[in-house]
């Protein structure tokens, strides 16, 4: 059986002008993840990443901690959905007057969750969206099929992506309702990994939202969600 370790990027720079950049804590989280893999003797045959900076920085930092070369295959299909366009489309639908990420994190994510439900329910104006829910699902499924088709047996693959993509991956594998992707998305912690087994075009979820490298008494205050 081959294995996939599907990792959510480390903490990004939420309050900065450029969100798509790891924070200082984010780099630490990535290093600790790499150290965990190294301590467990987990070695990867392939490393895949979205093309966003926070994806590549997470992968590079983890691989450096493992003393492995940063040979990363870049897959834009692993990139996150455009939450700004979804948020704006929901504003037009609902009349909500918020300022997006300029609001408090609590207010922003409360509204974003409603916007995501409207997105997966396909009630938003598609002309305002970068991509529809169906298009987003399709590109995540494309990556899943790519991995399955290239399986050579007994591989271990590290994949770094974002919360929405990871939640949708799980929703597709489990054949769960679209709403499950929304609920899971906002629960995923930074540098968590989901674990999958796959063989002969079949794929099974083994574990979800794992953070053994952070779930330690001295590191509990380093567990983050954004």
Image (cartoon, grey):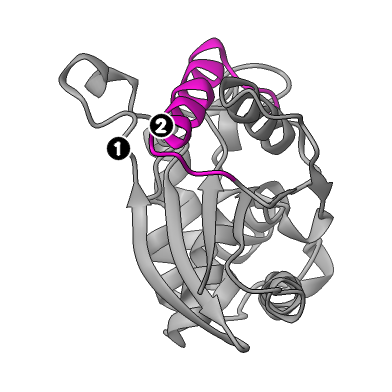
Q: Count up the numbered dots.
A: 2
Most extreme residue toward the left is: 217
Marks 1 and 2, the one that precedes in the sequence: 2
Residue 137 screen position, x and y as percent: 66, 75
Please say whether residue 32 is one of the residues in the magenta stretch.
Answer: yes
Q: Magenta region's main secondary structure?
A: helix
Cβ atoms at labels 1 and 2 below 8 Å apart: yes
Q: Nearer the viewer, residue 96 or 145?
A: 145
Badge 1 marks a residue whose secondary structure is: loop
Q: Nearer the viewer, residue 20 or 9?
A: 9
Residue 96 seen in the current view:
no
Numbered badge on residue 126: none
Q: Is residue 50 left or right of residue 137?
A: right
Q: Nearer the viewer, residue 161 or 159?
A: 159
User: The magenta stretch spans which residues?
Assistant: 20-43
Residue 173 screen position, x and y as percent: 50, 80
User: What residue sits right under mark 2 in the picture?
Assistant: 36
Most extreme residue toward the top is: 24
Residue at the image point whose x is 27% and y is 18% from the top: 219
Give the spatial CA distance, label 1 vs label 2.
Answer: 8 Å
Residue 166 screen position, x and y as percent: 54, 59
Give the vertical position of 8 relative to 168 (above or below).
Answer: above
Residue at the image point whose x is 66% and y is 58% from the top: 86
Give the vertical position of 1 relative to 182 (above or below).
Answer: below
Residue 204 screen position, x and y as percent: 44, 78
Please say whether residue 71 is one of the residues in the magenta stretch.
Answer: no
Q: Is residue 142 left or right of residue 202?
A: right
Badge 2 marks a residue whose secondary structure is: helix
User: What residue sits right under mark 1 in the picture?
Assistant: 212
Residue 179 seen in the current view:
yes
Labels 1, 2: front one? 2
Residue at the image point whose x is 57% and y is 27% from the top: 66
């Amino acid at each position: 059986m081959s294995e996939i370790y599907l990792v959510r990027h480390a903490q990004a720079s939420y309050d900065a002008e450029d969100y798509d950049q790891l924070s200082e804590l984010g780099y630490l989280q990535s290093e600790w993840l790499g150290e965990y893999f190294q301590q467990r003797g987990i070695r990867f045959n392939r490393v895949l990443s979205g093309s966003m900076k926070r994806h590549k920085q997470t992968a590079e930092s983890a691989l450096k901690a493992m003393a492995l070369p940063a040979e990363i295959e870049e897959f834009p299909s692993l990139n996150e959905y455009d939450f700004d366009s979804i948020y704006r489309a929901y504003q037009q639908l609902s009349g909500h007057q918020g300022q997006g990420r300029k609001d408090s994190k609590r207010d922003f994510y409360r509204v974003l969750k409603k916007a995501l439900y409207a997105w997966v329910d396909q009630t938003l104006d598609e002309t305002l969206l970068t991509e529809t829910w169906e298009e987003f699902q399709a590109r995540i499924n494309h990556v899943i099929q790519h991995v399955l088709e290239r399986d050579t047996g007994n591989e271990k693959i590290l994949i770094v992506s974002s919360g929405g993509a990871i939640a949708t991956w799980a929703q597709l594998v489990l054949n769960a309702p679209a709403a499950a992707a929304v609920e899971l998305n906002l629960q995923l912690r930074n540098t968590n990994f989901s674990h999958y087994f796959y063989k002969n075009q079949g794929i099974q979820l083994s574990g979800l939202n794992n953070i053994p490298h952070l779930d330690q008494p001295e590191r509990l205050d380093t567990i983050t969600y954004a």
